Amino acid sequence: MSLFLGVGIAIAGYFIGDGLKNWKNPSEKNFIDHFKKNDRPELIEAGEVHRFIGTPKGDTKALLEENRDIPSIKINGKMYFSRTSLRAWLEAHKLHSN
């Protein structure tokens, strides 16, 4: 029981100390923000592009093979795509259906 009490006091002390540390700078990241998944890597492996653009793997593979002008980078033999560049390329190559 004293173990749980000690752990509880330690956790409470951390949160209080973190709050006091950020008192004058409230925009500073807090403890909870470190667990949010908003910070995603900029580079996507070629095999994961389908998740980013929301298409089946086969369709994405065909898109990448047919459009060699899609901005990419090769690191240690693996092909990667920048989220920003890929988004811009997709926007520039929208198919307009009328």
Image (cartoon, rainbow, N blue to C red):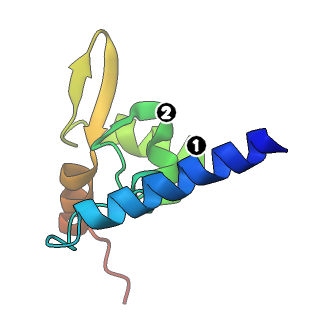
Closest to the observer: 38 or 3? 3
Closer-to-camera residue (53/70) = 53
Q: Position of residue 85 (x, y in %)?
A: 18, 51
Q: Residue at x 14, y 72 (%)?
A: 24
Q: Position of residue 76 (x, y in %)?
A: 29, 9
Residue placed furthest toward the left: 24
Distance Cα–Cα, label 2 vs label 1: 8 Å
- Which residue lies at the image location 27% right of the left edge and 44% below the top edge? 42
**Mark 2 burial class by Cα count in 10 Å: few <14, some 14-19, many 20+:** few
Mark in the foreground, 2 or 1: 2
Q: Mark 2 is on which residue type?
A: Gly
User: Disc 1 on helix, strand or loop?
Assistant: helix
- Which label's residue is closer to the chain start, 2 or 1? 2
In the displayed structure, 76 sits above or below 33; it is: above
Q: Position of residue 90 (x, y in %)?
A: 27, 61
| Mark 2–mark 1 CB contact (< 8 Å) | yes
Quadrant location, the C terminus: bottom left
- Residue 63 is situated, as x and y percent measured from the top left of the image, at 40, 46
Label drawn at residue 47: 2
Residue at label 1? 57
Q: Is residue 30 visible?
A: no
Q: Is residue 72 above or below residue 86?
A: above
Q: Quadrant of residue 23?
A: bottom left
Helix, strand or loop under label 2: helix
